[in-house]
Amino acid sequence: MSMLDTAKLGRIEYGEAWDLQKALIRDIGAGQREDTLLLLEHPPTYTIGTDRHPEHLLMSPDELASRGIAVFEIDRGGDITYHGPGQLVGYPLLYLDAEGLDLHKYLRDLEEVLIRLLAEFGLVGGRKPEYTGVWIGDRKVAAIGVKFNRARARRGFVTSHGFAFNVKRGVEQEGFGGIVPCGIQEYGVTSLEVETGLTLEVEEIAERVLPHFRDVFGYGSLRTVTEAAIRSTAAR
């Protein structure tokens, strides 16, 4: 069974993390490194996917600047979402062989990882057939948006982007109030702290998600990779 490299990067700027993803996609697609899962936080950021609806960003450029919120138009699927402090962001960079490729299963497996994580806290996470992501009732606790990048040296794809899981109380209001999240107007947003009443840290949840990711995706083992080693990849 294969190995998954994991790296916890703390809080880093969105653009820097995107550059790291691109470097890892290159190396994984060439068979030069193991599949890798990056776990991190971002400063306040809106990302707009390929299903772009400018009207779903409710803030003016001046308001964005005054609040220190960055905006990136990126190459994942989906509409607009928020990343910010108090949210665990996961970027799986995984090689998927072209034979038997099931892109929908990959999305469902990402959801399953987070559903199992919620179950640790006695919470029932669910899906909505018309949307990606993980829900507690009619409140979204995790957004998912991905891209499948064609591997240059192998017959398959390397995944990028991933999930954003709301951990801390307040993250569901702090940034999501300035957008129509993922273009969905009829449902709300929640966080793990709101649903459990506990005080939790993003670092703790990052550690808890790892065994679920390993089990759902069928990795034999996990290997911790240092932040310096990940950054050296992008520097080459």
Image (spheres, rainbow, N blue to C red):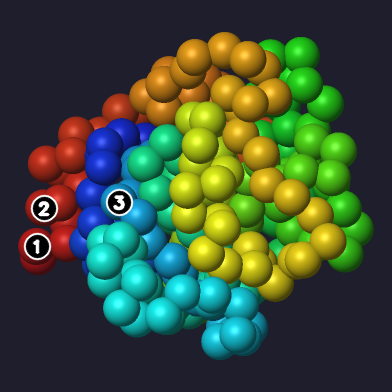
Secondary structure beneath label 3: loop
The answer to the question of whether label 3 and label 1 lie on touching residues, with beta carbons closer than 8 A, is: no
Please identify the quarter of the rendering in which residue 39 is found: top left
For image coordinates 57% across by 12% down, the residue present is 198
For image coordinates 70% across by 72% down, the residue present is 183
Amino acid at dot 2:
Ser
For the residue carrying disc 1, how many other residues have a C-alpha within 10 Å: few (<14), some (14-19), or many (20+)?
Answer: few
Q: Position of residue 184 (x, y in %)?
A: 75, 66
Quadrant of the rendering where the N terminus is positioned = top right
The answer to the question of whether label 1 and label 2 lie on touching residues, with beta carbons closer than 8 A, is: yes
Q: Position of residue 46 (x, y in %)?
A: 44, 66
Label 3 vs label 2, nearer the camera: 3
Q: Which residue is mark 3?
A: 43
Amino acid at dot 3:
Pro
Q: Which mark is residue 235?
A: 1
Q: Which residue is mark 2?
A: 232
Q: Nearer the viewer, residue 113 or 50?
A: 50
